[in-house]
Image (cartoon, grey):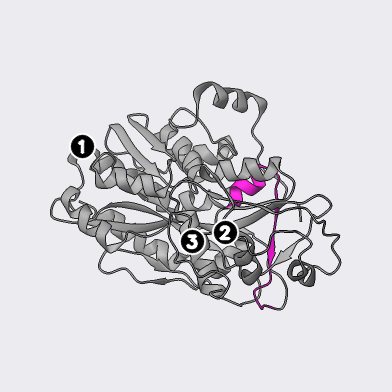
Amino acid sequence: MKLQRTNRLSAVALGALAACGALVLSACGSDNNSGGSGGENTKAASKIKCDGEGKLLASGSSAQKNAMDVWTQTYQSACGNTQLNYKPTGSGAGIQEFLQGKTAFAGSDSALKPDEVAQSKKVCKGGQGINLPMVGGPVAVTYNVSGVDDLVLNADVLGKIFDSKITKWNDPEIKKLNPDAKLPGTKIQAFHRSDESGTTDNFTKYLNTAAPAAWKHEPAKAWAGKGGQGADGSSGIATNVKQNDGAIGYVELSYATGNDLNTVKLDTGASAPVEATTDNASKAISEAKVVGKGKDLALDLNYKTKADGAYPIVLATYEVTCDKGNKKESLKATKSFLKYTASEDGQKALSDKGYAPIPDEIIGKVRTTVDSLS
């Protein structure tokens, strides 16, 4: 099914983006989507309580880039004394910069590992790094196969495709799931992230959990599958899938809609194949459990759900910061910005960009934790 792009950038916005680049988000919008309507942004901005000033530096997850674009645009319109710069360098790079003390917070699509928590205590004086789930959403499996605009796959077949065990689009296992499709004998070009990515971590957690016989590699931010072609960032995968007949890849839904890419429906064992939508992702995320200790709110996602309408390839993007020991010069601005992103208005702004707001029970805990940062 071809997803329709919403909220297209105007030609003026595209020109401005090309001119200024995408890294300094206080000045530029997303390469895929811009913020919401002026009226909505103005209304949301009027509720923001600004605090702090100067530069607020952050980096990490490219999965949340489009969310950060919207949030930054709204926040900056209210809080001109703070210059927010979020660099979508990928989860792995973002965590490393945070652990090196270069940023106030990091965006990561997977929670801190025990060794990273231990390292964070050197940066967070008297405290440690914690995970604050702020953005949810589906990881869409995108494809470009001539003559095919409705495709159903399951975890087992996806595992074999991305591990180079299924190499042609007319393979019997794909045909079995798509009896009415005219599948060509085109060679499959499977694209994966070349950089360390929380999106890869979540995608491979899904494969390893839902189809362990087909995907025997341990989940990780670094790609471990056999064969395939690497691409830098979600935008790199989206571009390569769009340009190559026979291609398949995995990206956050906003990159699929923003590039008018077809997405796979998943046969999860539910009564009908499940499409990658924010509503369907929300049904899966609602089954998540908080497994972090203390102020840490790391989640355990249910990748094996078979509930009707629940799309299981989901991720939760965390803002990683210190519970105690945040840098004095950026603490006030960090809390002010994260209070906005966790607010009702901040979460509401996500839906139009292909993201799923964090469930109420969990985001309520995030708000309480942000208030307590020191």
Amino acid type, callout 3: Asn
Image quadrant where residue 175 sits: bottom right
Image quadrant where residue 281 sits: bottom right
State the residue in front, 202 or 127: 202
In the rendered image, which residue does mark 3 sit on? Answer: 202
Look at the numbered discs 2 and 3 and tell me whether their residues touch, using CB distance below 8 Å: no
Badge 3: residue crowd in 10 Å (few <14, some 14–19, many ≥20): many
Badge 2: residue crowd in 10 Å (few <14, some 14–19, many ≥20): many
Look at the numbered discs 1 and 3 and tell me whether their residues touch, using CB distance below 8 Å: no
Amino acid type, callout 2: Pro
Image quadrant where residue 1 sits: bottom right
Above or below, 239 relative to 15: below
Amino acid type, callout 1: Glu
In the rendered image, which residue does mark 1 sit on? Answer: 329
Element under disc 3: helix
Above or below, 120 relative to 53: below
Q: Which label was assigned to residue 363? A: none
Element under disc 2: strand
Percent x, y of residue 123: 19, 48
Residue at 64%, 59% (x, y): give it: 277
2 or 3: tag closer to the N-terminus? 2
Question: From mark 1 to mark 2, how far is it between C-alphas?
Answer: 35 Å
Direction from residue 257 to residue 288 in the image, left or right: left
1 or 2: tag closer to the N-terminus? 2
Percent x, y of residue 205: 48, 66
| Residue 264 is inside the magenta segment | yes
In the rendered image, which residue does mark 2 sit on? Answer: 138
Percent x, y of residue 293: 27, 69
State the residue in front, 288 or 259: 259
Question: From mark 1 to mark 3, how far is it between C-alphas?
Answer: 34 Å
